[in-house]
Image: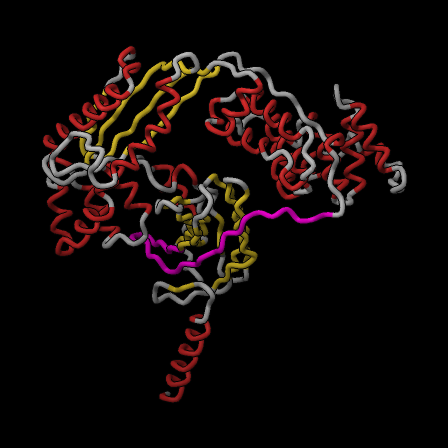
């Protein structure tokens, strides 16, 4: 019997040692029985494209647990930007998870960006694919944080850093000519209404509310705000302010009434500071409102941070104890004051801020003006004006690797307009960037205006059957007849079957893509 237990202990030690040599950095005592492969994090312009495969086998999580894989992009300015998480539910946990999400009444970190969770059965190897894109500033780093959650606790178990590379178009033997693809003129925007939201974090001496430009790091923060506001508030012939509001927030330390009064005074003083610099603002109603202690903002910061001491007990106190029923006192007493000191050092400075919102209208720009506005404030251009800038800049461009990147800007500001996707796909095909072209074409693959580009995409992929199907469909689209007919002549020596003619109306777009 003793020999049996010795063999059993030795087998467990060997198994734990094997799992301990995983490429992922283990931050807990759990054995890691999974692998993240095919990792790809590419920065294209100002958009990060992340994909990977998660391979799981054996008992990685129990049937009652959830595994969260949370990509976190660390911006150059030190801020953390969370990307859409991957959620893997144990087979027994899935119905409870869905019911829990449906019943949540408070704003929760996962709610707005939650994907549909996937089920892990634990009896066989399973591979889960992840892919997402998000606009972030270049120059940062990426880390995947892994958490396991049971009925009561969420525990950080591992992290893995993923290198971020800049996109370099692959040199291809063939790229599309600009004359082969379709550029669609957007509709005119008769009245250009825009809004600007700015978060302002100004440092103050204790219990003070005056804006001191020379105090701490205020000079840089105020210059950032001036850079955003100066065009709007000094060019009345171009911008007409519709409304503006400032909301001041305070961190929870101190009395509730004192913080409410302090946030009100700081909001009013910041408004006075701006109106002294920009007298034009006096013409508009410009309310400044103190919002007091920002407990919602504090909760959001806590839920973003996997390093918060006694994470679950802190959130439990915030859920159970009212603001006026001793919430802050219980947080101060918890764990000898360690969690509260952590919040005081890490979170509270970020809560002391102003949120400023402006709505305004913008006049139309002439073509020569739009070029300069595109470089300074592209959000103030209409879709049609961005199109004109892109056309002017690329009409005689010989460098294919940077052709039509201006159309990507149109996708950023007009993501729901199919025309933006079609034009960005056309430019990508001219660059030879087939991955970007596919990304733009997938959402609009049922739009007849995209049929010609879909044919070009498959022609560059040497898939001549699908190319012909789409080009024959494009023959019936007004304005695309000549271009589609010209492209079809490229297939004259490819020996495409006559049956393709019969497939044109029978094959669905989903089957083709």
Residue 413 in percent (x, y) is at 50, 28
User: Per the image, is 193 magenta?
Assistant: no
Quadrant of the rendered image containing residue 506: top right
State the residue in front, 404 or 57.
404
Residue 51 in percent (x, y) is at 54, 50
User: Per the image, is 159 magenta?
Assistant: yes
Q: Quadrant of the N terminus?
A: bottom left
State the residue in front, 133 or 272.
272
Residue 402 in percent (x, y) is at 62, 39
- The residues colored magenta run 146-172
* Residue at the image position 90 percent from the left and 41 percent from the top: 493
Where 140 sits versus 4, above or below? above
Where 162 sits versus 234, above or below? below
Where 238 sits versus 12, above or below? above
Residue 91 in percent (x, y) is at 45, 53
* Residue at the image position 76 percent from the left and 44 percent from the top: 174
Q: Going by the image, does 205 lie left or right of 419?
A: left
């Amino acid at each position: 019997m003793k020999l049996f237990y010795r063999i059993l202990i030795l087998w467990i030690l060997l198994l734990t040692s094997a799992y301990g040599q995983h490429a992922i950095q283990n931050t807990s005592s759990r054995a890691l029985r999974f692998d993240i492969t095919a990792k790809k994090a590419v920065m294209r312009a100002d958009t990060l494209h992340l994909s990977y495969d998660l391979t799981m086998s054996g008992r990685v999580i129990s049937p009652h647990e959830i595994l969260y894989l949370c990509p976190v992009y660390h911006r150059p300015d030190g801020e953390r930007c969370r990307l859409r998480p991957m959620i893997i539910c144990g087979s027994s946990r899935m119905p409870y998870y869905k019911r829990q999400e449906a019943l949540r009444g408070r704003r929760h970190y996962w709610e707005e960006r939650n994907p549909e969770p996937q089920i892990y059965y634990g009896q066989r190897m399973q591979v889960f694919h992840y892919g997402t894109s998000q606009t972030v500033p270049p120059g940062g780093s990426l880390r995947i944080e892994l958490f396991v959650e049971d009925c009561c606790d969420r525990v950080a178990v591992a992290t893995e850093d993923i290198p971020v590379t800049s996109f370099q178009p692959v040199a291809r033997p063939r790229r599309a000519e600009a004359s082969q693809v379709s550029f669609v003129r957007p509709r005119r925007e008769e009245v250009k209404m825009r809004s600007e939201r700015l978060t302002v974090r100004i440092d103050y001496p204790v219990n003070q509310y005056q804006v001191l430009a020379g105090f701490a790091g205020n000079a840089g923060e105020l210059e950032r705000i001036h850079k955003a506001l100066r065009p709007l508030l000094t060019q009345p012939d171009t911008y007409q302010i519709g409304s503006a509001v400032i909301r001041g927030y305070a961190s929870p330390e101190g009395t509730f009434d004192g913080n409410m009064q302090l946030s009100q005074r700081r909001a009013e003083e910041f408004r006075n500071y701006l109106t002294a610099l920009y007298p034009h603002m006096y013409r508009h109603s410009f309310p400044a409102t103190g919002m007091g202690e920002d407990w919602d903002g504090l909760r959001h910061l806590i839920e973003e941070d996997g390093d918060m001491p006694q994470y679950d007990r802190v959130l439990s106190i915030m859920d159970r104890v009212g603001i006026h029923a001793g919430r802050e006192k219980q947080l101060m007493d918890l764990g000898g004051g360690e969690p509260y000191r952590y919040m005081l050092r890490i979170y509270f400075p970020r809560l002391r801020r102003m949120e400023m919102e402006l709505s305004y209208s913008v006049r139309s720009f002439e073509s020569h003006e739009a070029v300069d506005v595109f470089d300074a404030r592209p959000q103030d251009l209409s879709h049609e004006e961005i199109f004109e800038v892109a056309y002017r800049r690329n009409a005689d461009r010989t460098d294919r690797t940077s052709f039509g990147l201006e159309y990507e800007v149109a996708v950023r500001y007009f993501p729901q307009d199919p025309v933006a996707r079609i034009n960005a796909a056309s430019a990508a095909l001219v660059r030879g960037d087939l991955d970007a072209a596919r990304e733009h074409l997938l959402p609009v693959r049922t739009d007849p205006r995209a049929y010609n580009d879909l044919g070009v995409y498959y022609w560059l992929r040497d898939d001549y059957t699908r190319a012909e199907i789409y080009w024959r469909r494009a023959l019936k689209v007004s304005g695309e007849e000549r271009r589609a007919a010209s492209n079809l002549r490229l297939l004259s020596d490819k020996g495409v079957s006559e049956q393709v003619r019969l497939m044109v109306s029978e094959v669905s777009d989903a089957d083709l893509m």
